[in-house]
Image: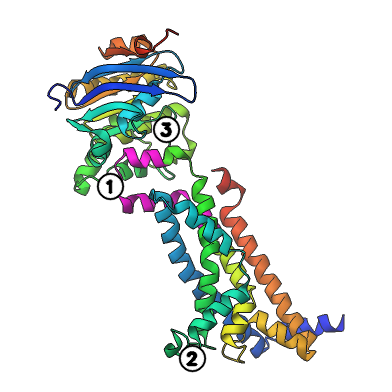
Amino acid sequence: MRSLLTALNLILSGDRELFTTVGTSLSFSFFSTLFAGILGIAISTILILTRLPVRRFLISVFNSFMAVPTVVVGLLVYSLLSRSGPLGSLGWLFSPYAVILGQSIFALPIVISYLWTGYSRLDIRFFETMQTLGCSFPSKCLLVWKEAEAAIVSAILSSFGRVLSEVGISMMLGGNIRWYTRTMTTAIALEITRGEYEYALALGILLLLLAIGINTLTLRLVGPQKEMA
Amino acid sequence: MNPKGIFRIQNLKVEFNGRGELFHIPLWDIPPHDCLAVMGPNGSGKTTFLKVLSGLLSVPTGTILYQGIPIQLNRNRLAQDVTYVHQHPYLFRGSVYGNLVASLLSKPLSSKERMFRIQDTLETLGLRGYEDRDTRGLSGGEAYRVALARALVREPQVLLLDEPTAQADQEAKRIVINALQQVVRRENTALIFSTHDEDLCKDLEARILRLEEFAPCRY
């Protein structure tokens, strides 16, 4: 109980380090979701609008990647960014760039899989109507995005939530450097090992509130009324 | 080549999900400004026939020439010239006006010309005042008229309609028939529609293609 009160006190007092960590987490998640979102929307739209013979295979590959643990993604990107790796010359390892790159790779299959599911639920007559109206490819893209607006919002917010709560990539690629790459999840892991439960609890409460906020926002934007429509 | 018709159907055989051969048309020409009613009992393949002509379904067996070229080799031309309207049409999310604009995106028109065409078509189909209506709130009959307006505004060479009056009440039916009579009179569009409605065929003075006459066994 005392730990909880101390944690709440840390939050209410606006502890600078605590909220810097929250800000770092949010900005990393924002940029990685942005990059994964743009790429994921483009890839899934191309896949749904074209008759690529390998599209079913690609979707099953992306679906499989959703199950890959974050530490494996972290390890993969680490091997690319380490000094002896092919991208070592960039000097990104243990910097925000590395974390955002890793998180973007992690979020990409999530966005694509969610969108593929959403797009696949669109009525076959929708695609036939676009074809018979002679819509160009850019027009088709715009129409698909408008029809699947709820699926897009859901995919983006879900991947944002997943990225925000991951720890493996941030730890391996960011190195948990104070005031620089320390995120909420890496900080929680660190504070627990140091026995600073109150600080970890405060971060945990904030993470929980953010998760609830994202879910509430998702339901508001793509809730039952929109689904029914 | 195909001097007589905008479409030439040669040896078209359509089968349906294990139910055997639905129909077999050895040879049929559809002239450029034809008004053709496709008739037949339920399940006789009327919708399939229209979808094959529109290029939405591939030609099962046989050949269909569009302007002298097999339609599978002429898909881009077909998409620009031929417009199909489903019996239960799909309207894009948003407004009625937005739906008509979407169908003109591939046409090189000035905004003034686009607006004129849209207003004129809405007027023809009794949809004046519907511009800002959300498509999700429309009845089946209204939705069909919007879909028909969306097709007509493109001024297609060939207009394919699946049961255009099936969902219409008397007033809506009169409006649809008036609009289709205008299409027939304009003589720059071939109108091909499926129907069970003999009166509609008379009103439009349509030639009739009875699919059951091309079925291997009578229904």
The furthest residue to the top? B218
* Magenta residue check for B186: no
Q: Residues within 10 Å of mark 3 (few under 14, many from 20)?
A: some
For the residues beneath circles 1 and 3, the answer to whether they share a chain is yes
Q: In which quarter of the image is the C terminus of chain B?
A: top left
Identified at 74% across, 83% down, the residue is A200
Q: Which of A222 and B114 is in front in this view?
A: A222
The kind of residue on which mark 2 rests is Arg
The kind of residue on which mark 1 rests is Leu
Q: Mark 2 lies on which chain?
A: A
Label at residue B89 = 3
Identified at 62% across, 85% down, the residue is A21
Q: Mark 1 points at which residue?
A: B105
Q: Which chain carries label 1?
A: B
Q: Which of marks 3 and 2 is in front?
A: 2
The furthest residue to the right? A1
Q: Mark 3 lies on which chain?
A: B
* Magenta residue check for A142: yes
Secondary element at tag 2: loop
Secondary element at tag 1: loop
Left or right, residue A40 beside residue B7:
right
Q: Mark 2 points at which residue?
A: A83
Q: Where is residue B15 in the image (x, y as percent from the top left)?
A: 42, 23
Dots 1, 2 in contact, CB < 8 A: no
Q: Position of residue A78 (x, y in %)?
A: 54, 83
What distance separates the C-alpha of mark 3 from that of mark 2?
A: 59 Å
Magenta stretch bounds: A127-154
